[in-house]
Amino acid sequence: MLKKIIYMSIVFVSMLSSASVNTDKERYESNESIIVNYSEMEAQSSEWMAIYPASSSNDFGNIIQWKLSNADVNGSVTFEALSLGTYEVRVFNNADFLVSKQIVVEEDALTTTLETTKDIYLADEEIVAVFDNMSGNADDWIGIYPAGSSNAWENMLQWEWIEGGLVTGTQAFEAMPVGDYEVRVFFNNSFTEEAVYAFSVEAPVVLVDLAVSKNSYDPFELIHVEYNNMRGMSSDWIGIFSIGADHEKMNALEWRDAKSLVSGNLSFNGLIAGTYEVRSYFDNLHQETITFTVQDTVAVSTLYDDFEDGIIDPRWTRYAGPAMQILNVGANGTVHAQIQAAIAGQHSMRHTRDYRGGLNYAGYYFTFGEVDQKMKFLELDMRIGNSSHVFAFGVKIKTKFGDRRIEFASWLNHTLPSGQQVIRGPYGNVLEGHRQAFTQDNYLHVHPGPTDYYVGTRYGDFVHYKINIEEKLRVLEPDNELISITLFTTSGGDYDNLTLASH
């Protein structure tokens, strides 16, 4: 009966104690010291630990080696090497047993090894660990920890039992986020690592993909670029460069942001004949380059009216204002100088302003009919005269986004009287409340007239204009595309050699 009471007292004391004990290894060779780590002791001078043969009783006579805990809560002690066999490290407070840990000493104990199949994995790859010389215990396990962290359970990210008591084998883990990690193996459900191996996870390398809609374009044909695998950030951009140009954005012939999209399409204004590069950038960091060419083709043009027959073509319509007049002076239709004096014996047509109350009410237009999409340039000669001083001319066009009217207005370069619109700037605008003839369906684009062509010249000179209509359209609508030019419009001026051209 007394033996039973003593045994129950030992069990009760053990249950009350929170002390724990571990060793630096599970398996030792016969020449290796045994390092014992203990924690959560009660810091009593009566606490001690000893090495016993496994399965022996706690009788003092069975002790092989023993050490005091030095009244520390946490600490370690070192025991001398042991002969071959299986042992237990047991911890006591006086004669009360607290906790134990089993170890094995064997001849030429094999070193446990561990590695991963790769040192660097991608974030979408599973992690595979390869182990050898495990203890074969059913409670051996393997886990992944953040690099440099302790073996505490709360630091463990993934873990698996080494099923079937394998000594040698592999263990797969789920893919990990980008970072630095360690895979660690442990014997017999302990937290004493037997081997550790470091590896890292990096983001997949995704290259930006660029493609043009064709390898060779006609002069001034829009360049369509498809992109994939951009970052989707506002600082991503794509540019058109001359071959070999430096990467600075200022050297781009044209550049556009990628609209904060990972994948998408952009169009760029057409170019003259040559070879060019499309380049993608993350902020200022170059990513990818592809090349394309613009072939050197013969320009195609159609002269719609040079007025040399002395009659008003029925394709002209007077919307408002005085009647149109055929003049006996005109521009040289074969030599297109920037500015040229009117030539007697040539012909041109006058459209006279109807200037009342600070506004011009005149309006005239010419119907082109069916026009090929390649005909992007409006070309003409125009004279500023006393009867048509305040002028505007332009076109009505069909576009990918619907009908538009583009107007080139001389008054945009001046300040109008008080109470009237004050418009300035080199890039054009949409004029709210502009006269009815030009605001139908609210699709008016207005650009300043290229006044530099004629400022400082005398009245009576003809000025030659050649304007890329699609380029002007895309100033305000960079994703829009010209389908065809349908009308020429004007509110004043003397005109000659009305032409549409491809380039």
Image: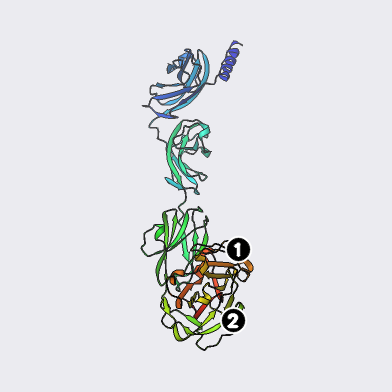
Side of 4 relative to 94 (left or right): right
Which quarter of the image is occupied by the N terminus? top right
Locate residue 418: give its quadrant.
Answer: bottom right
**Relative depth, front residue between 199 and 68:** 199
Residue 440 on image: x %, y %:
63, 69
- Residue type marked 1: Glu
- Residue type marked 2: Ala
Residue marked by disc 2? 323
Which quarter of the image is occupied by the C terminus? bottom left
Residue 40 on image: x %, y %:
51, 21
Asked whether the residues under the numbered discs 1 and 2 touch, taking CB atoms below 8 Å apart as contact, a structural biologist would say no
How crowded is the residue under tag 2: few (<14 C-alpha within 10 Å), some, or many (20+)? few
Mark 1, secondary structure of its residue: loop
Q: Residue furthest top?
A: 2
- Measured along the vertical axis of the image, is residue 260 above or below residue 271? above
Residue marked by disc 1? 432
Residue ID at (48%, 80%): 301
Which of discs 1 and 2 lies nearer the camera? The answer is 2
How crowded is the residue under tag 1: few (<14 C-alpha within 10 Å), some, or many (20+)? few
Side of 304 relative to 110 (left or right): right
Residue 398 on image: x %, y %:
58, 72
Mark 2, secondary structure of its residue: loop
